[in-house]
């Protein structure tokens, strides 16, 4: 019985949550190494379980009658709303969740090990590891979610662990602002996610993925024929859900938090803001892919368009940035744009579903090489104590291992064979070609830009001007190098995995082949991008500056990230704070409360006037009594006369 | 003596014993012991409740005692509990117990302070166990009046003004309420027979529609003012700002819940026809309240004002849910009463502790507090995350239950209102993180703050218990949700028919 075999997976979240609780509550009383050790032990355990689960799932028990099936080895009803609507906590194994388990635990383990070196001597070392455990717990909960609401819960929890880690240096105003921005922007996006869940569940009467995804089920038919403003209700729901995914995955126009999130410690950027959490949006769409593909092709078009646009937009910005982490952040956005596009152009089964497989494949390879790029950047920052490319140059002599690993990663992201990125990007481009050639040419161009900006970074840091450094830069310690080499090897070889034999939209494996008509132009433009970068940046020179002055408008737009941040700032500060919130506060004090005070004042005035009647003078009371009696008698006479 | 009357008796005995001692030290300890006994007996009550239910006792109310009190008007001292009232009693027990520890540093007229504080709690306990509307109203007044003294004497800032404003507005509301309750009473036997104040009995008959349309708005607004129904909420920011810590805790944590409980159980459930007919109007008010409170909170600088506006917003959810005519939404309303009660009590406790150290509540004068007071700082962040509805804390459970329940209304008007209410959770994140960012993070602005002490033991007792309960409810909500849902079932079924 496969379900029993996989029941060990329940120890993954338990171990990580325990590690968080123990290190979080008692970490400050432990030695840093002990606290870090507990967290690392938990994630290594999770990694071992994930690998064995992946082995048994893909090679023996997952494949039933030629199809990878959904397994639920653990299920617990957590909060019940109605007979059919309940939030369940469970574990769902299918090709994409098993694949994600491997990705998350691998990168997370490497980041844990790397952090021993990178964060050494840092105040709050224990707190850092507690947050890493919290993040890993939340991310695994998200990946393994069996229920849409469970996913939302862990979705929020990864958001808060991201917040805590971005703001790790909490005395630094930029870090505090960045963490706040990340949380609020994604929170806004999650509003769409939540409304999408509510809308979807109202009609389908379920939150459970197996029920929602059942090809013979009623999920799609329950919403047939319903529409709102000319668009089908299912499309609305799925676009709203995608809004949540777009926020988490930093898709335009909800991307503004990701570059700022680089204020967090660099290993965190590698783990959360490059390899795992930011691809949660892609994972979300992939998780509900059956609904998107069969029930709401319109929603998929939105996904494709946003993905393609973001990949171009971010690549253009990355070309002019000078902070090495921000270049990588924009690069991440651009690569996630690729994944979204691939999902958007995909069909459901067989060869038609190439886009789905390509997207997951790229997610997998990107996690390896982008984590490597970030960890490499961390090693560089560790050596020169700066994020700014202008402070670097000629580092290949000082950091030989980092240099080689960084080169592998740069080649991988540029789509140069035989490194991992080549294979997955090739599939994405093939899927785009089959769907819409405009997308293909856009992404082809972006591939060139990617190669250019990545090698601009590479040459500026490791070649370029030979600087003299105040402190001689030194190679990273063993713990950091171990993680770099591990991910370097992964980036070199994972491209050879025949992904379509394992991960497909409908669970049925199929064969893919190399698309030479696509591979040749895409490798060609990658090489062109690298060549231009080499010409401009390999030796110190003025070509780049002359280009910038030749195109001041475009240069400025790209450097200032198209002024999107300024636009957001204007909306939040001028419109919401000054235009809505402050007037409400004033209105409340002066109008609403003022009218209450007004009533009180009138009452007091009336009392003030009438109290004169209580004069204590007997003759006044006598007059009043006589007058009253006369009035009463007259009244009686009047009534009597009628 | 029946076990429910003990809930009133233990606080009364505590007050009497406190009256015998003058030294602040002894008074505090007696109050703490008394409220600990109270909390323990509530936990026993909970066990007994589940034992009864487990043994198959399906009566609507358990542990019922019914004594005729004033025969000619058929007023009874009738008490009993179900899942709904028990959960609120539990809330009250936790808040008053922690409130005693949050008041540990009161040195001015300690004896009188604790007597008045516990008197307030007595009223609340009495309110929640009452089945007789008249007795309930009496306990309600018993809870409101000590508030005037507590704010007027032990408050800060313009305390006389705030105390007077609060009392007058709540008294005005209770005048409406009295008319409403009497209206219900005089229509409680449309087919002839003795009139009754027992709301369980009343829920079994149908009050004539004309009377419902007259008395529902009076009752709903009467209770609503206490639950900060827009635009009758302005007593709350001023009242909180002037009130001493424990009073804010009890007030926002528990007293405002009397309003929510009454609005749902008495106004809506006894007069469903009028409630349904007039729902649109009050839904608009509740929706405005939840967004308006949240947006108003962004512009505040004083921590207590931020939290007061936040309460307007979160209590708007309760009033909103009580107009959804859906049992899941009602369950959410009760969960939100408990959740908001705990979270806001934690907030006010922390604000009081921070104020006691920094002598300011203006966030712009603070900064870097996390560095100096890590325990209080972390607890404040937890309260903040809980308040903005992060999973793992109680508010998430309550809010999601409300949203799922409200979304079951397939009506365009209600749906738009629901979406607006849901969107206020984004605004909540803005004002919570804004305040926390300015106050807790960054560099220490005021050098004098560097030497301030972190939480003392009694502060920790209050903070840890509240954090523990909030987290516990957030992680294991199932039993509580089920208990409340089951408690709502009989009246809901009668109402729906």
Image: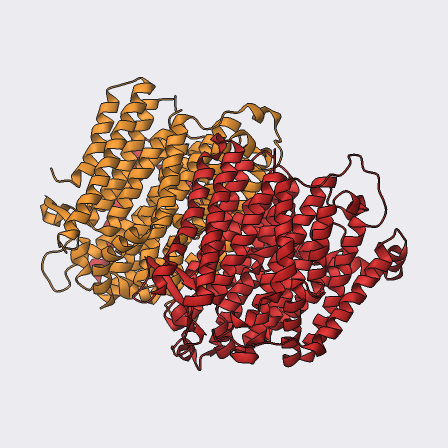
Give coordinates of residue B71: x percent, y percent: 9, 46
Give coordinates of residue B231: x percent, y percent: 44, 52
Q: Residue at x 29, y 20 (%)?
A: B26
Position of residue A225 in the picture relative to residue A519 (left or right): left
Give coordinates of residue B376: x percent, y percent: 47, 33
Q: Is residue B222 visible?
A: no
Q: Residue at x 77, y 57 (%)?
A: A455
Camera-nearest residue between A354 and A238: A354
Camera-nearest residue between A406 and B423: A406
Camera-nearest residue between B291 and A3: A3
Q: Farthest residue toward the bottom? A: A225
Q: Residue at x 76, y 64 (%)?
A: A449
Q: Which quadrant of the structure image shows residue A621?
A: top left
In the picture shown, does residue B88 fall above or below A361?
A: above
Q: Is residue B91 visible?
A: yes
Q: Which chain is orange?
A: B
Quarter that holds the C terminus of chain A? bottom left
Q: Which chain is red?
A: A
In the picture shown, does residue A294 fall above or below B168?
A: below
Give coordinates of residue A610: x percent, y percent: 38, 40
Position of residue B232 in the picture relative to residue A488 (left or right): left
Quarter that holds the N terminus of chain A? bottom left
Q: Which quadrant of the structure image shows residue A360?
A: bottom right
């Amino acid at each position: 019985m496969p379900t029993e075999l996989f029941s060990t997976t329940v120890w993954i979240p338990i171990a990580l949550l325990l590690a968080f609780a123990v290190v979080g509550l008692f970490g400050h009383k432990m030695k840093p190494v002990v606290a870090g050790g507990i967290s690392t032990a938990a994630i290594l355990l999770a990694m071992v379980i994930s690998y064995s689960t992946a082995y048994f799932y893909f090679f023996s028990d997952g494949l039933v009658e030629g199809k990878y099936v959904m397994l639920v080895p653990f299920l617990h009803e957590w909060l019940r709303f109605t007979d059919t609507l309940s939030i369940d906590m469970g574990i769902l194994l299918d090709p994409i969740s098993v694949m994600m388990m491997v990705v998350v635990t691998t990168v997370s383990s490497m980041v844990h090990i790397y952090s021993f070196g990178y964060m050494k001597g840092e105040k709050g070392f224990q707190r850092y590891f507690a947050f890493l455990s919290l993040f890993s717990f939340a991310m695994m909960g998200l990946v393994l979610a069996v229920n849409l609401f469970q996913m939302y819960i862990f979705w929020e929890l990864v958001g808060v662990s991201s917040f805590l880690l971005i703001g790790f240096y909490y005395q630094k105003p930029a870090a505090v602002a960045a963490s706040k921005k990340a949380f609020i922007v994604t929170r806004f996006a999650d509003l769409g996610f939540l409304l999408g869940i509510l809308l979807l569940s109202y009609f389908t009467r379920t939150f459970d993925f197996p029920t929602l995804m059942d090809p013979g089920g009623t999920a799609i038919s329950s919403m047939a024929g319903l529409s709102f403003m000319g668009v089908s209700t299912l499309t609305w729901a799925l676009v709203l859900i995608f809004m949540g995914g777009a926020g988490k995955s930093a898709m335009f126009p909800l991307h503004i938090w990701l570059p700022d999130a680089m204020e967090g410690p660099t290993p965190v950027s590698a783990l959360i803001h490059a390899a795992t959490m930011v691809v949660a949006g892609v994972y979300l769409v992939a998780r509900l892919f059956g609904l998107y593909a069969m029930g709401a092709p319109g929603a998929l078009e939105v996904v494709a368009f946003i993905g393609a646009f973001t990949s171009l937009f971010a690549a253009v910005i990355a070309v002019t940035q000078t902070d090495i982490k921000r270049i990588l952040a924009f690069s991440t956005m651009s690569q996630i744009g690729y994944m979204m596009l691939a999902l958007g152009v995909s069909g459901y089964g067989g060869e038609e579903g190439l886009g789905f497989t390509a997207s997951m494949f790229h997610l997998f390879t990107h996690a390896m090489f982008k984590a490597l790029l970030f960890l490499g950047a961390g090693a560089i920052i560790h050596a020169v104590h700066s994020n700014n490319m202008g402070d670097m140059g000629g580092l290949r002599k000082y950091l030989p291992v980092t240099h080689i690993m960084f080169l592998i990663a740069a080649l991988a992201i540029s789509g140069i064979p035989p490194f991992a990125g080549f294979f997955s990007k090739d599939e994405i481009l093939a899927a785009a070609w089959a769907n819409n050639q405009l997308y293909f040419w856009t992404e082809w161009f972006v591939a060139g830009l990617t190669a250019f900006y990545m090698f601009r970074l590479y040459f500026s840091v490791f070649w370029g001007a030979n600087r003299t450094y105040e402190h001689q830069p030194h190679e990273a310690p063993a713990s950091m190098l171990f993680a770099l080499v591990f991910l370097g090897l992964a980036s070199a070889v994972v491209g050879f995995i025949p992904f379509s034999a394992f991960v497909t939209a409908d669970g049925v494996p199929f064969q893919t082949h190399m698309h030479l008509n696509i591979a040749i132009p895409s490798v060609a433009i990658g090489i062109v991008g690298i060549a231009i970068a080499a010409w401009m940046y390999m030796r110190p020179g003025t070509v780049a500056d002359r280009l910038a002055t030749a195109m001041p408008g475009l240069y400025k737009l790209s450097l200032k990230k198209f002024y999107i941040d300024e636009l957001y700032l204007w909306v939040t500060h001028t419109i919401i704070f000054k235009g809505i919130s402050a007037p409400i506060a004033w209105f409340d004090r002066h109008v609403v409360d003022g009218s209450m005070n007004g009533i009180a004042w009138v009452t007091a005035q009336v009392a003030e006037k009438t109290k004169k009647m209580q004069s204590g003078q007997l003759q006044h009371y006598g007059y009043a009594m006589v007058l009253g009696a006369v009035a009463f008698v007259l009244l009686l006479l009047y009534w009597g006369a009628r | 003596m029946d076990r429910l009357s003990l809930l009133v008796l233990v606080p009364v005995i505590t007050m009497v014993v406190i009256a015998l001692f003058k030294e602040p030290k002894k008074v505090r300890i007696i109050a703490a012991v008394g409220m600990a006994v109270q909390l323990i007996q509530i936990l026993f009550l909970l066990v007994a409740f589940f034992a009864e239910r487990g043994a198959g006792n399906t009566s609507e109310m358990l542990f019922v005692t019914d004594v005729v009190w004033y025969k000619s008007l058929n007023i009874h001292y009738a008490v009993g509990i179900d899942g709904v009232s028990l959960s609120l009693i539990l809330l009250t027990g936790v808040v008053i117990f922690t409130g005693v520890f949050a008041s540990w540093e009161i040195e001015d007229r300690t004896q009188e302070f604790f007597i008045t504080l516990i008197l307030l709690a007595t009223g609340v306990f009495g309110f929640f166990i009452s089945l007789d509307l008249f007795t309930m109203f009496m306990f309600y007044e018993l809870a409101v009046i000590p508030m005037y003294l507590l704010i007027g004497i032990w408050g800060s800032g313009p305390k006389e003004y705030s105390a007077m404003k609060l009392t007058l507005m709540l008294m005005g509301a209770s005048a409406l309420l009295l008319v409403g309750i009497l209206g219900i009473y005089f229509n409680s036997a449309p087919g002839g027979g003795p009139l009754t104040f027992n709301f369980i009995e009343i829920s079994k008959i149908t009050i004539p529609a004309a009377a419902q349309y007259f008395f529902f708005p009076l009752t709903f607004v009467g209770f609503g003012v206490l639950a900060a129904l827009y635009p009758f909420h302005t007593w709350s920011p001023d009242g909180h700002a002037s009130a001493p810590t424990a009073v804010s805790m009890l007030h926002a944590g528990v007293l405002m819940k009397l309003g929510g409980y009454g609005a749902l159980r008495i106004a809506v459930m006894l007069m469903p026809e009028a409630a349904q007919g007039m729902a649109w109007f009050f839904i608009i008010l509740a929706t405005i309240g939840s967004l308006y409170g949240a947006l108003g909170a962004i512009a505040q600088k004083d921590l207590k004002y931020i939290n007061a506006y936040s309460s307007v917003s979160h209590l708007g959810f309760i009033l909103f849910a009580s107009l959804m005519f859906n049992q899941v939404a009602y369950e959410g309303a009760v969960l939100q009463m408990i959740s908001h009660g705990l979270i806001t009590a934690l907030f006010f406790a922390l604000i009081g502790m921070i104020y006691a150290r920094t002598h300011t509540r203006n966030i712009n004068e603070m900064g870097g507090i996390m560095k100096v007071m890590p325990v209080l700082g972390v607890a404040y962040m937890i309260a903040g995350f809980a308040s903005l509805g992060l999973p793992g804390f109680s508010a998430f459970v309550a809010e999601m239950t409300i949203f799922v329940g409200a979304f079951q209304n397939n009506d365009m008007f209600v749906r738009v209102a629901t979406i607006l209410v849901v969107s206020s959770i984004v605004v909540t994140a803005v004002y919570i993180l804004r305040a926390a960012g300015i106050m807790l993070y960054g560099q220490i602005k005021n050098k004098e703050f560097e030497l301030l002490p972190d939480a003392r033991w009694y502060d920790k007792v209050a903070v840890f218990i509240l954090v523990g309960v909030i987290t516990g409810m957030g992680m294991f909500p199932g039993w509580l949700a089920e208990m409340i849902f089951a408690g709502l079932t009989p009246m809901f079924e009668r109402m729906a028919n």
